[in-house]
Amino acid sequence: MPEKEVIIIGGGAAGLAAAVACQKKGIEDILIIERNSYLGGILNQCIHDGFGLEKFHTSLTGPEYAQRYIDQVMDKKIPFLLNSMVLNLTPQKEVIVVNHHGLQHYRAKVIILAMGCRERTRGAIGIPGARPSGIYTAGVAQELINLKNYMVGEKIVVLGSGDIGMIMARRLTLEGAEVVLVAEKLPYSSGLPRNINQCLYDFDIPLLLNHTVVDIEGNGRLSGVTIAQLGKRGGIIPGSKRKIACDTLLLSVGLIPENELSREAGIVLDPITGGPQVDERGQTNILGIFVCGNVLQVHDIVDNVSLEAEYIVEGVAEYLEGRLNKEQEIKIELGEGLRYVVPQTLHTLKDTIFSFRVNQPGEKKVLIFEDNKTLIKKKSLRRVNPAEMIRIKLTSRELKSIKSIKVRLV
Amino acid sequence: MKITNHHYDVVIIGGGVVGCAIARELSRYKTSIAVLEKEDDVSWGISCRNSGVVHAGFNYKSGTLRAQLCVEGNKSFAKLCNELDVPYKKIGKVVVAQKKEEIRELKKLKTQGEKNKVESLQIINSAELKKLEPNVKGIAALYSPETAITSPYMLTIALAENALTNGVSFFLNTEVKSIAKLRNSDFRINTNKGEFTSSYVINSAGLYSDKVAHMVEKNKYRIYPCRGEYYVLDKNASWIINHLIYPVPKPGIGGLGIHFTPTIDKNILIGPSDEYIKQKDNFSSTSKIMKMLASESQDFLPLISSQYIIRSYSGIRAKQAPSSEGGFWDFVIEESDTVDNFINLIGIESPGLTAAQSIAKKVVGIINKKEELSPNSNFNPFRKGIFRFEEQDEETKKALIKQDPNYGEIICRCEKVTKKEILEAINNPLGARSLISIKYRTRAMMGRCQGGYCQTRIMEILRESFKLNPQEITLKGKNSYLLTGYRSNKENKSCQKKKLLSLEEELLV
């Protein structure tokens, strides 16, 4: 069985950045395994711009952003497999890969999980009504339009105001479709403010907050949807139902980290993030299996995916050199105002980047890190929004000799 | 395609499980047979939208056709599935009592079952139930080890394909408009695809069997559509139950109650509800019933949570019993008493799947009495399904990829369906070409991502295989087009990436 130092599952934004970072750390024996016929993953279908502002200080399209990493992979001759799917991952860090050449087993000292995420579907959120054609998740519609050159419909209602949904509302408008409205069941958008402005308001597409789709009609192709306004407790406000004639319903109702391989390998998952539980170096409960990117937690900006990948590779290098020790185990306790925190555990007290999402939008908030009522760090936040991930670094000096951590937002 | 002047000995109206079983059963004899199906594929009416249970037969009143044909069907089901290469698992069923007074009902069911010649029925106590089903809440149960599961659509497809191999003609997208009895006593069947003539007509039109019967005789039957909604759970929930789990049936309702069905593919179905509706083609799910399913399932299995739900769907029962009465009327399987050679199958609801082959034998018996059918010595009872890569051991998988590299390309990530299987499904002998037809034949798009990964890939394979325009690709035939065209008329190659050469490609086997 071929043995590698590092196997990276997934050749998208996270996997490519991890591979390049590994190579920079002097790790030579790497293999990226990618199921598509090209590298770059979902970035290839994100042909809008706005990528790279943080990482490269310029606005790139998705394919351009990916190409920056692909060029480095090619330049440094980092090996990769295309058209190859990992069928199985074991706790012993063996993978079985299938492609046109056959089935191949590999073993690695380190596995980096970089499988990305998938879209939540109609079935998972239980929209009632008929089951005609013309119901697409936003990402599938994006793939069909941007990669395959097909048009998915002519008159469109978008449910959910996730970023891809809003970007697709603009995209479809530019392609000549009529986007009637975007309905969001929450009182606030689940996408970035810049997308609300640039994708909806600039194109006169109404965003209806507190609204959802309650019925779908159509025998062959979709012929219409019924939307309704929701009250404070989430019930339908009587008399608010209205039918909208359309031929397409686009869903942008959330992303789920793609962790089927992780689950089968026995990696412990966080029920809130949907990703593995990790320590400060992105290491899972199985030693030598690290995670980064959307398979760990769904990001809103690709730059953060790259940064996260580079960050966990620090741990990968230390692990390979035998320097990554579990000195202690501190579980991070989540207080009020926060939906989740990554990492969930600390094993060492080195510089650590924490990622958070808040429960609801707010202004003038303070994020407080405490060790049994003793303040570790305080950070004022002018504005918080569930759509925007908060990333904060605590230095080894700040973390020095703590016994516990509780984080809360007040 | 306009068909004119096609004559068959027998025309079967309806390509559901019963129509296809009759077609196959008749193809054992030297007869010319046509099946007319109004949809784009077989099984799309009632047959693809039920629980897929092979009932043992204790639920039905003794002495009825339903009881008799169900028990017969159950006993020969394993053999049928074996001949047709269709999945079948005898997993057993428990009818769970939660209140003391329900135990009496269990005993009644057991007595009725034994009268119907159902084998091995047992009443078990709560400790024994706990052993069989640790997560189910109940105080006692009726245990039926003879109850099994199958895939209802795969069985229907298999019956049709085997019938086709044995000479039966299938006409899809062919809807019967009217039927006339000619002077020479033949039937003339007028359809949207032209005229057919035949000596016999078999009305196995399911929900529309009343309408078809009315085409030749005065209003005698009426079918009331009774909808049942389901939830489908992720395979990750499959550990929760081991058997089919049913409540004690309540009198006067249209079904057997909300139950839990482990499927052949390790999903769990919750449902079906029973609700009389007006239209026969309204397969909608409703928020009211979806909420009810979620809350009722908690009574039996508190471990089931909404996070496992991946899909909802509904089926419609073809009931003769009106809503005011509820319950079940017996199957009608008989030659019309006013029109010779016109055989009606009316009100074939549950256990129609289990009984399909027995029903078919009964219909052939009716014809045989009048015709002296001579056996078809070329009849081949065997049919091979699509070989599933995922179910093979590693050595076989390797050999398969060597033999055809398309086995090395996984198209559906969740269900691990390869390109080879998709291609076989696309080239199915019935000529069904929609996404749903591929889904029912391969399981692609049935997993937790519901086609998010594979749907576009399958659309591409379909388009390439048949040189279709984008607008011609459909979800389920007819007007269910998926795309409205190309983004622009000019094909834009620049957005397709140049194929990168994989550095490892040479290193591999």
Image: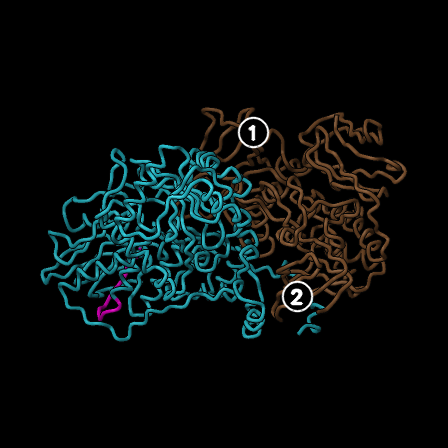
Task: Answer with left or right where residue B458 lies relative to residue A10.
Answer: left
| Mark 2 residue type | Lys
Q: Which chain is cyan?
A: B
User: Which residue is painted at 46% across and 24% down in the image?
Assistant: A238
Is residue B137 within the magenta segment?
A: no
**Which portion, as a residue range, is magenta?**
B27-37
Real-space Cα distance between discs 2 and 1?
45 Å
Marks 2 and 1: CB-CB under 8 Å?
no
**Which residue is identified by label 1?**
A210
Question: Magenta span has B33?
Answer: yes
Residue drawn at x 40%, y 61% is B86
In the picture as drawn, the residue positioned furthest to the right comes out as A397
Q: Are marks 2 and 1 on the same chain?
A: no
User: Percent from the top left, x then y, of residue B175?
Assistant: 28, 54
Q: Quadrant of the N terminus of chain B?
A: bottom left
Q: Is residue B48 visible?
A: no
Chain A appears what colour? Answer: brown
**Against B449, is A26 above or below?**
below
Badge 1 marks a residue whose secondary structure is loop
Q: Name the residue carrying label 2.
A: B499
Tell whether A181 sits left or right of A83: left
Q: Residue at x 78, y 27 (%)?
A: A366
Foreground pick, B507 / B435: B507
Chain of residue at mark 1: A
Q: Is residue A342 left or right of residue B438?
A: right
**Residue A365, horizontal then vertical, whole percent:** 76, 26
| Residue count near mark 2 (Cα–Cα under 10 Å), binned few <14, some 14–19, many ≥20 | few
- Residue B4 occupies which quadrant of the picture? bottom left
Q: In this rendering, which labeled residue sits more in front, label 2 or label 1? A: 1
Is residue B140 depicted above or below B197 in this figure?
Answer: above
